Image (tube, rainbow, N blue to C red):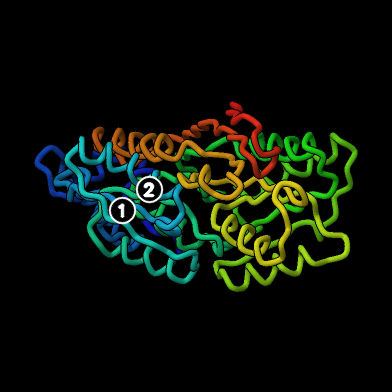
Amino acid sequence: MQTVTIKILAEKLKLSRSTVSKALSDSHEISQDTKKRVLAMAAKLDYAPNPYASSLRKKSSKTIAVVIPEVADSFFAQAINGIEAVAQDKGYHVLIYLTHENFLREKAIVKDIQNGRIDGVLMSLSSETTSYAHLHALFKKELPIVFFDRVCPGINAATVTTNDYAASYRATQHLIDCGCKKIVFLAISKSLLITGERLKGYQQALADNALPFYPADILVCKNDTAYNNSLITKLLTKPNRPDGLLSSVEKLATSIYTVCNQLQIAIPGQLKVVCFSNLQTAPLLHPPLTTITQPAFAMGKTAATILFKALKKGTIDLPNNTVVIPSVMLVRNSTSAIGTPFMEVQL
């Protein structure tokens, strides 16, 4: 059932939202006849006041919620720093919720936010999220939401992302330029929009270089290190094992290095590796890891800036604003010979 909002009441009555709001508050500025019309329509549609919209008009809680999959991932840790840099400047508290890549936990968190006192939400989806009813319900509560990195399809909300398609294409092309003929794409979800964009970039680069693509060359891992290690071990012990790996998530870098060490597979001699990662320790790995590094701090800061602009205006209407901030490729020795100079490639 659709949640009845002041906007819906206004449309039904052909009145402005401010007029409906004032009528519901029994304002002296509104005539008795208009108040009666508004109250009658509210009763007919079973309208219930929205605490979030009210807080925006009256008194702010000075708290925003940040819903993310985890903090172990360097990207999200850096994004939080960007968010807090803006929040502290505005005098706001940041309440961080972790879904741990679990869909049911994400649903529970969203429900908790609906029942709590939050001024706005910054959110990145879990890898298990394939249904979006809970997010549509949150959106209908007229609570300002900005999605960043892992965005929700079908919701007319502001988003902050990076150039995932171009970055993945360039990473795949780099592996091909380094001599790779069989490149496997690693992911932890096929439902996320960013995974889809990165997969498209990977496939297009293969096609542009006349290299075949096989569905078996997509390895879907989980939020489980032991499982991932086992899956990568099977991949790298096949007769026709890959000579290049493109990991679309940071957490798989450790599994790749662990398995290669156990199987005594030389990187980059026998296997070249590129990973979407913001790991500050990437240059210290053996060998140093070639990464697609996202502008995590800038993405968090930009998402927070968009949200606070809406809060400052006292509006629940965020623009359908899509901001794309480019990543960079940092070429290290997991794809090039030891001693090759470090190189930064703008994407």
Q: Which residue is mark 1?
A: 65
Quarter of the image holding residue 47?
A: bottom left
Q: Determine crowd level at label 1: few under 14, some 14-19, many 20+ residues with C-alpha closer than 10 A.
A: many
Residue drawn at point x = 52 percent, y = 32 percent: 324
Estimate the x, y position of residue 333 in percent, counting from the top left: 64, 40
Estimate the x, y position of residue 71 in percent, counting from the top left: 40, 56
Q: What is the count of numbered marks?
A: 2
Estimate the x, y position of residue 97 in percent, counting from the top left: 34, 60
Q: Which residue is mark 2?
A: 122
Residue drawn at point x = 84 percent, y = 34 percent: 208
Q: Is 258 on the left-hand or right-hand side of 322? A: right
Residue drawn at point x = 52 percent, y = 49 percent: 150
In the picture as drawn, the residue positioned furthest to the front comes out as 339
Q: Secondary structure at mark 1?
A: strand
- Residue type beneath disc 2: Leu
Mark 2–mark 1 CB contact (< 8 Å): yes
- Front residue of 211 and 50: 211
- Residue type beneath disc 1: Ala
